[in-house]
């Protein structure tokens, strides 16, 4: 069973961002599968690192796109990205220090973040960009 499943609510109408959201979802689902299988500390670290690196890349791409088209909610969006990265990086650091991770809490956090960020916050910029010819 996957942590996240793609639905129409995930689509924002900008293909490049929708593709990246799909990759982000896959990355979270891979982390979920690893935790369910009972992965090793090293495997968990690798999965978490992959999630952090792709999140950074995606957030940078998204912010650059929003900046290029003068999206009025850019600063709020950027702050949300920074907070998410801070939370994920804290978790990664705990894993690296061998402090363990509360798997159910981590998965709940990721599921909640994904749905709130992509299905709510990101929906605000889809129509804005579409109105400027970005699909």
Image (tube, rainbow, N blue to C red):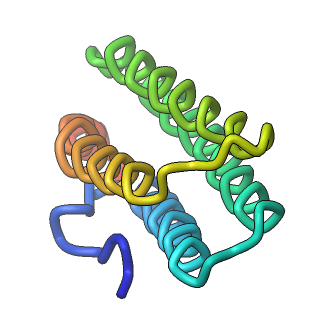
Identify whether 130 is placed above or below 33: above
Look at 56% across and 71% down and name the residue there. Answer: 35
Quadrant holding the C terminus = bottom left
| Residue 27 vs residue 131, the one in the foreground | 27
Q: Quadrant of residue 76?
A: top left
Look at 51% across and 79% down and name the residue there. Answer: 36
Where is residue 50? Give x, y as percent. Answer: 71, 56
Q: Quadrant of residue 69?
A: top left
Where is residue 101? Give x, y as percent. Answer: 57, 49
Number of numbered discs on residues: 0
Identify whether 98 is placed above or below 46: above
Identify whether 1 is placed above or below 114: below
Q: Quadrant of residue 30?
A: bottom right
Where is residue 110? Give x, y as percent. Answer: 39, 51
Where is residue 60? Give x, y as percent. Answer: 60, 33
Identify whether 67 is placed above or below 120: above
Look at 61% across and 30% down and name the residue there. Answer: 90
Q: Name the residue at the bottom extreme.
A: 1
Look at 58% across and 45% down and name the residue there. Answer: 55
Residue 4 is left or right of residue 97, and the answer is: left
Residue 116 is left or right of residue 99, and the answer is: left
Quadrant holding the N terminus = bottom left
Q: Name the residue at the front extreme.
A: 99
Residue 41 is left or right of residue 133, and the answer is: right
């Amino acid at each position: 069973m996957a942590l996240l499943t793609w639905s129409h609510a995930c689509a924002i109408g900008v293909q490049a961002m929708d593709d990246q959201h799909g990759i982000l979802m896959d990355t979270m689902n891979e982390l979920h599968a690893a935790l369910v299988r009972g992965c090793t500390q090293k495997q968990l670290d690798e999965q978490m690192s992959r999630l952090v690196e792709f999140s950074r890349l995606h957030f940078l791409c998204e912010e650059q796109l929003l900046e290029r088209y003068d999206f009025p909610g850019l600063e709020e969006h950027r702050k949300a990205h920074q907070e998410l990265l801070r939370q994920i990086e804290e978790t990664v650091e705990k894993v690296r220090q061998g402090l363990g991770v509360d798997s159910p809490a981590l998965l709940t956090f990721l599921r909640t973040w994904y749905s709130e960020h992509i299905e709510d916050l990101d929906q605000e910029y889809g129509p804005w960009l579409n109105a400027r010819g970005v699909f």
